[in-house]
Every structure is written in structure tokens, then in C-alpha cells.
Amino acid sequence: MSISLNPWVWIAAFLTLSMMSFLYKDNIFYKIGEHIYVGSSAAFMLIYLWYFDVKPKLIDGFINNTGFSRWILIIPAFLSLLMLMRFVRPVAWISRWAIAFTVGMGAGLGITGLLQGFLVPQIKATILPLYVSGHSTLMTIYLSLNNILLILGTLSAIVYFYFSKEHTGPVKKISQIGITFIMVAFGASFGYTVMARISLLIGRVYFLLHNWLGLV
Amino acid sequence: MREFLEKAGNIDRRIIYLIIFLAVATTILVKARFKSSPLPEVQRSYKIINDLPSGSVVMFSIDYDASSMPELDPMLRAMLRHCFKKNLKVIMLGHWPLGLPLGQLALDDIAREYHKKYGTDYVFLGYRPGLQAVMLNLGKEIRSVFATDYKGTPLDSLPLMRNVHNYNDIAILVGLEAGSVGDAWVQFANARFNQKIILGSTAVITPDLYPYLQAGQIVGLIGGLRGASDYETLVEHPAMASLGMASQTVVHVLIILLILLGNIGYFATRRKK
């Protein structure tokens, strides 16, 4: 056992135990940890944005650039000032112009990105042959069944979310198949989520035993 | 017996937390290890990096922060080890400002381990806001987004960056994801510029990324601690993820038992009512 002598490790261990203490009940140590986390994160974010964005791109850019690439910077600087108007109540509405610009750009990029990078390739990926020839009969059955399941799952799940027609008769049957596929997906998702949360605990316990107490 | 089952179905949640904590701690303390064969998608990711010719450029994107560190940090370290062992060049950037120092820490550690030189073998670019705009501009000219590295050194004065201008010069992009940035990499870097992508993700978002793998939009997927442990096995350097997987196995069995116990207790109580 070689306990750490690094004060930062001790602070990290104290904060880890403080956050974990919430599992017993809300307490002062948890509150201290929570406030330090929120405060330091906000401060860190501010510093990062200043040094990685505002200073190099806007301030240094304005000082060092010439011509068009210099004067174009007035537009983002002006929009930033408009955004800050939120803190001046009588003219707070002006900040909406800057927000409108951000929303418009985000929506434009998002829509094209989703269509080109998600919807079309994903639809293409479900256009599959129902019969796939493998190097053995078993492989042929496996590959074909895989494609059939994929197509059936996609179509039936879409039918489940089709609300323009009442879910009766064959539509009901297909939507029931769809919900089965959706439930399987939720189950897989839940299993992975449990795994992720346990991983976080493992990470912290490992830190306490290895970095702090030196037991491992 | 019924009384016991009723009590079992109504265990105080704090006792369950304690049992889980002790199970994790004990498994780590005894350094238990369970053997498992790497998942096919992880093997594929490994093979793709392994087959790259020496000197190829791999770009890492750090899109996570401290809350996802236990899963993604071992993954990053294992992949960096693989890259440096294969003499590949590494460029690192990120879209989660709070996580970038973690990436930088791992990069510096592993580079030191393999005696790699900053600027020649690896470069840390840092962060720029504007997710999609950054990804699109990287496809045209990296300098239009990152004129300098994180220290303010102009990119052209770094030997590694002299011939790297856009995605055409990057063999593989590795996105380590704890949120939706991976979707953006696929939608912008892959769909528009055909950039080959391997995604490493937290287990929470891994199921959402499988459709990309199925559709061939990403070439590899490394999911959660299991994925990290598999990669550690493949690079023959078992570390924290491999150790953690034993705890995962024990805790999963425990959780299944607790679910069974809870349900038996519930049915026993219902029958009594």
C-alpha cells in the first residue's frame, strides 16, 4: 500500500467521495462538490472559449488580417454584441436577431446533414435482397434471414408510428410486430446503459484504490 | 419463507449500492480477469488501423469529458499505443472543451512512452466552436479553422502538418463519443467528404451507432468498456479496461440476481394481497 502524497489526488478523492455520499442522502459534502463542479466547469469553458475562439479568431484575426478577411469579422463581432443585449432589459429584444442567425444556420446545416448523412444512406442500407447466397446452405439461411429480419423490423416499426390509419386488422398485426422489434431495441439500449453506469463506478473505484490509496 | 421473500423484494436501495460498490472494489482488489474474445467490429477497427502504411495520419476527436472518462480514456490510450507502435502520425482535436485536456494528457503520456516528438509525430490542435462549420471547413482546408495549434504555433511550422490540408490527407478519423458529435462526423465528414471513420463510444450511445456500421457509414465501432477492453487485448497491453471488465461481469450477474429477487418478492407480496 502506497498512499498518494499528491494534494490534487486527495482533493479529487474527497470530491469523489462527496459526490458518492449523495447515494446515502443529500448532504453538505455533496453540495460542496456539486457547486465546485458547476463553478469550475463554467470558468473553464469561459477560458477555453476566450483562448481558442475569441482571441485567435476575432481579436488576433482583426489585428493581423487585411482587406476583406479583416472587415468581415465585424459581422460576428456585431452579432455577439447583439447577443449580449439580453442583459439590457429595454433593448433585450435585439438579441433575437443574433439568435435568429444561429437558429437559421443550425437548421440549414442540420436539415442537409440529416438528409444527406442519415436518412438517405439509412434507407439505402435497408434496400437489401431477401435471398443471399452463402458458401454453405447454413450461411445462405443465416444471411438471408438477417436481411429479412432487418427489412421486416424496419417496415413494421414504421407502421407502428403510422397514425393516419386506425391500428386494426392487418395494420394492428404489423404494428405489433413493430413494437416487438422496438422493445428488443430498448432492451439492448437498457443493457448498454447499465454497463455504462457500472463503468463509471469502476472508473471512480479504480481511482480511489489505485491513484489514492495505492492498493492496486 | 414468504416473509423472507417479501423482505428480499423490498431491500433498501442503499444496501444495493453498498453491495455493488463492494463487488466492484473486491474484483479490482483481487485483480480478477475473465478471458473474452474481441468483438468483430472492434477487430475490424484494429485491422483497419493496423493495415495503414507507416506515416499515415490518424485524426482523433475528443468528444467526451470527465463523466465518460472511465470508458473512453482506456480506449483512447489503447488506440494511441497502436498508432505510435505502427509509426502513424496523430492529430488531435475535439468538440467538448471540458474533455480536451484529458485527451491531451493521454496523448502526451503515450507519446512519451513511445519517444514521439511533438510537431513531427503528433500535434494537438485544440478546440474551435461551431461543430458543423468546423467539420465542413476541415474538408476544405484545416488552416481555415486552425491557423495555429493549441500553443499558437502556426501549422506550417510543424513538420507533420505541412502536407496535411484536409480530409484527403487523413487516413482515418477516430471519434471518441459521449454524445451526438459522432452523428455530426458521419453526416458531415463521411457523407460529404467520404472520410473513413471509426467511432469509439460510451455504452449508452453505442446502440444508436450500430446503424451507421450496418450501413457502411463508419468502418469500425468500439463500444463502451467492453470495446476498450477488447482493443487493449488486441494491442496486447491489458490495462484499466481489462481490469474493469471483470467487475462488469460480477456486477451484471449481481444485478440479474437482484432483479430476480425483486420480482420473486413482488409476486410473493401480490399473492398475499
Image (tube, coloured by chain):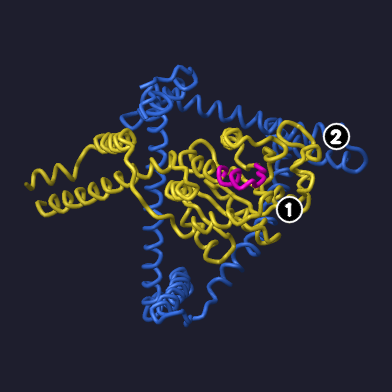
**Which shade of the palette goes to chain A?**
blue
Picture coordinates of residue A147, whole percent (x, y): 46, 75
Picture coordinates of residue B242, whole percent (x, y): 41, 43
What's under tag 1, amino acid-wise?
Answer: Asp
Residue range of the region highlighted in magenta in the rendering: B80-92
In this view, the residue in front, B188 or A23, is B188
> Which residue is pictured at 67% across the width and 45% down the height?
B89
Toward the right, the furthest residue is A67
- Residue with the mark numbered 2: A62
In this view, the residue in front, A162 or B156, is B156
Which chain contains the residue that carries disc 2?
A
Q: Which mark is residue A208?
A: none
Q: Nearer the viewer, mark 2 or mark 1?
A: 1
Secondary structure state at the residue bearing disc 1: helix
Picture coordinates of residue B101, whole percent (x, y): 60, 33
| Quadrant of residue A54 within the rendered picture | top right
- Residue with the mark numbered 1: B169
**Which shade of the palette goes to chain B?**
yellow
Name above or below for residue A152 compared with residue A113: below
In this view, the residue in front, A38 or B203, is B203
Assess disc 2: are there few (<14), some (14-19) or many (≥20) residues with their C-alpha within 10 Å of its C-alpha.
some
